[in-house]
Amino acid sequence: MKKYIFLLVIAALGFTACEKSYLDTKPEDKIDKEVILGSSDYAKLAINGICRSMSMQYLGTQGMNGEGTILNWYGTFTGNDAQKSNQTGWAPLWNSTYHQRPSSIYLYYPWFYYYKLVANANAVISNIDGAVGTDADKAFVKAQALTFRAYSFFRLTQLYSYRWKDTQGNTPGIVLRLDESTGDIPLSTLAESYAQIYKDLDEAIKLYQQSGKDRSEYYEPGLEVAYAIMQRLHLLVRIGRLLQNTLL
């Protein structure tokens, strides 16, 4: 008798295991957006993820490691003080000739990288107001996301827009993606881009101050970071206008 009861239990377990709901599981390394952005505590983890993405490797290429690559390849390497001896294989970077090759990985890497930051920042900005949490926590997290977006747009304008003194800011340059959409939208001028960067930073600074909070890690954006980006933008605009007036 015990033998038959044992077999019945095994059969019952077998039928239960075959139900569709039993196999309907979600990957442990992925969390729904509604969950991760449903509370300010989880949104803080999203901000931490954006911070982490600034030091990750991309496009399967050893040298493309987030922000460090931007600072070296598109900053130091193109400067007059960079050491260029025995670097013939890096000529496209040293001389910026990658601009002439639309399919070059050097050309589209910054676009890919910074719009990845923008997309993640936009997800936080679009959802944090309705999240569970204190007003102070939500204000601080939103300010951080706005700082990321402003910084990304700022860097993109430097790499993909004409200089202010050459065009008075009136030529198309970058895409101002301000929500979670993925469809095509027209390019914005440098003047429009600067106006949006100022707007994001103004709002971020106000939210930082309202929150009364400060960043807990050195690698996170905070009030002083927003001020630093704004001062850098002030400097570029002022120099551009001075040069423009000098050439007139």
Image (cartoon, helix red, strand yellow):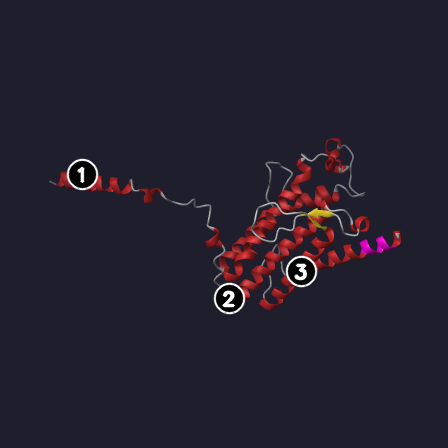
**Helix, strand or loop for disc 1:** helix
Q: Of marks 2 and 3, which one's residue comes earlier in the chain?
A: 2
Residue 120 tag number: none
Q: Amino acid at mark 3?
A: Lys
The percent position of residue 217, horizontal first and vertical second, equals 59, 57
Circles 1 and 2, Cβ within 8 Å, touching? The answer is no
Image quadrant assignment for residue 80:
top right
Q: Amino acid at mark 2?
A: Thr
Per the rendered image, the range of residues in magenta is 239-245
Image quadrant assignment for residue 194:
bottom right
Which residue in the protein does label 3 denote?
Answer: 199
The percent position of residue 111, horizontal first and vertical second, equals 65, 43
Q: CA distance from mark 1 to mark 3?
A: 70 Å
Q: Of marks 1 and 3, which one's residue comes earlier in the chain?
A: 1
Q: Which of these two is toward me, 178 or 221?
A: 178
Residue 126 in sight here? yes
Tell me which residue sits at (62%, 43%) in the image.
Answer: 112
Which residue in the protein does label 2 denote?
Answer: 134
Q: Amino acid at mark 1?
A: Leu
User: How many neighbours does mark 1 have within 10 angstroms: few (below 14), some (14-19), or many (20 or more)?
Assistant: few
